[in-house]
Amino acid sequence: MGQQSPPDRSDWWRDAAIYQVYPRSFADGDGDGTGDLAGVRSRLPYLAELGVDAVWFNPWYPSPMADGGYDVADYRGVDPLFGTLAEAELLIAEALELGIRTVVDVVPNHVSDQHPWFRAALAAGPGSPERELFHFKEGRGEHGEIPPNDWVSEFGGCPWTRIEDGSWYLHLFATQQPDLNWAHPLVRSEHEEILRFWFDRGAAGVRIDSAALLAKDPALPDFVKGTDPHPYTDREELHAIYRSWRAIADEYPGTRILVGEVWLPDAERFARYLRPDELHTAFNFDFLARPWDAAALRESIDSTLALHAPVGAPATWVLCNHDVTRTVTRYGRRDTRFDFAAKRWGTPTDLALGLRRARAAALLSLALPGAVYLYQGEELGLPEVENLPLDRLQDPMHFRSGGTDPGRDGCRVPLPWSGDRPPYGFSQDSTAEAWLPQPADWAPLTVAAQSADPESMLTLYREALRLRRTEAALHGDKFEWLSTVGEVLAFRRGDLLCVVNFGAEPVLLPEHRTLLLASGPLAGPAQLPTDTAVWLRVA
Ligand code: GLC
């Protein structure tokens, strides 16, 4: 049943379960085929029943949607596609009444090319103060026809676009996302005001997009492999920015949190963002990037806990988000190695295998000390939609790769709520066509179908989140590995054990214990089968 109002715990974020809502694809309240805030408001009881502590919303701001809303034209509003600012305020308040805090997404690295600052910069011409808010530069070559440096866009291709007057501007992502110049004081003060704007409206936190990319080497030099600091990643200047943001968050009552999207392969550099006067937490992409393999996941858990401990920050555990292949599909691949640079996994195979592993992974990640992030649809075991019609794809990553990368639309397909055919209750209007087509075989995956099924993924998540809340052993930092043989991970937190079998053969569970939850049927009373996890209470 629904939760009570959130306990006034200043450390709520240290072990929170935070649910990620991609507003375009969660629920469509006005029947136009695109999700919206009315849809989210109508489904708040679902989130309360699921048992999450907070919701992080992907951007809902006015945007031309060149990158799913990460091209923001106005940081203080709501896109008409999603609703109004007044509705966002209502949503934040209504969610809180059900015990759910709200985390908004801020996108400081770049703006939309329709943002008033960029339009003014284009109009004002070369050398103007308006252009100093961005990175405008002359090109190289006799006629300035060669881009100013050799960087490569995070979405592939050249991150420079030349405009009519011959100058180039920098965009680490799509052409429509010009990068801001973070050396400019106005860029800093504007974002401090944006933070206050949302904290004043009750936001309990902000998720910081591309948090390690904002600052650039002012000379914008070519990238020489191995140079330190990298000309646009993880630069020292960032820490002063986040210290000033932390000071603002700390001015507000009830603990407002800063969560960084920090993709850095170097664990120690990553941890520097989590020092006590900087960000509260950051997404643990290392864990998400590991294959379904006992040794690899154990190593990730160990290094995660070891690097967070000295800075006193809780770990976060993330299995998927709106940028990566859905867990069921990823773990259903025989080759589950992750290509960090491309943010992609190996070849597709068996969804039944993927689902079994995703269920076990849910119990593994929900039992670890720290906060967890759940991406909408993860609790339904949705697979990646890999056969979207090409003419419906929207992701700039797909287009910028010249069509070689499928892009991220496959994990952004609207949720199935009920019924036996699209739009599966996603839209108020049952004849509406969702902005991305839903597969014809999703009827068994709807919330309605799974709610009635004690064996469903949804039932597993609901039960695991309930136990995570009520079992004292799952709060705090206690964590201890148990020695095991073979491909098995087992750890103890107080009187609770989590055991996961990654091996091909069943393993014997310990005696004198009570079974609290299993990700799949046991093979006999004490036998844990392959790709299965259990939570046990021991004396
Ligand atoms: C982040 C977002 C991603 C977006 C990019 C540019 O990585 O998660 O969806 O495309 O930043 O804003």
Image: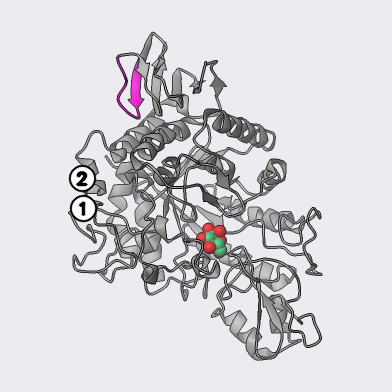
Q: Position of residue 209 (x, y in %)?
A: 57, 59
Tell me the quarter of the picture where residue 196 sits.
Answer: bottom right
Q: Nearer the viewer, residue 473 or 354?
A: 354
The label shown at residue 418 is 1
Residue 521 is one of the magenta-drawn residues: yes
Q: Residues within 10 Å of mark 2 (few under 14, many from 20)?
A: some
In-image side of 385 versus 232 (left or right)? left
Mark with earlier residue (2, 1): 1
Q: Nearer the viewer, residue 268 or 188?
A: 268
Circle 2 — which element? helix
> Residue under circle 2?
449
Q: Amino acid at mark 1?
A: Ser
Tell me the quarter of the picture where residue 270 sits.
Answer: top right
Q: Are discs 2 and 1 less than 8 Å apart at CB?
A: yes
Q: Nearer the viewer, residue 184 or 64?
A: 64
Question: Quick check: which quadrant has ligand 1?
Answer: bottom right
Quadrant where the image shows the N terminus: top left
Residue 515 visible somewhere in the drawing: yes
Residue plotted at (58% across, 52% down): 258
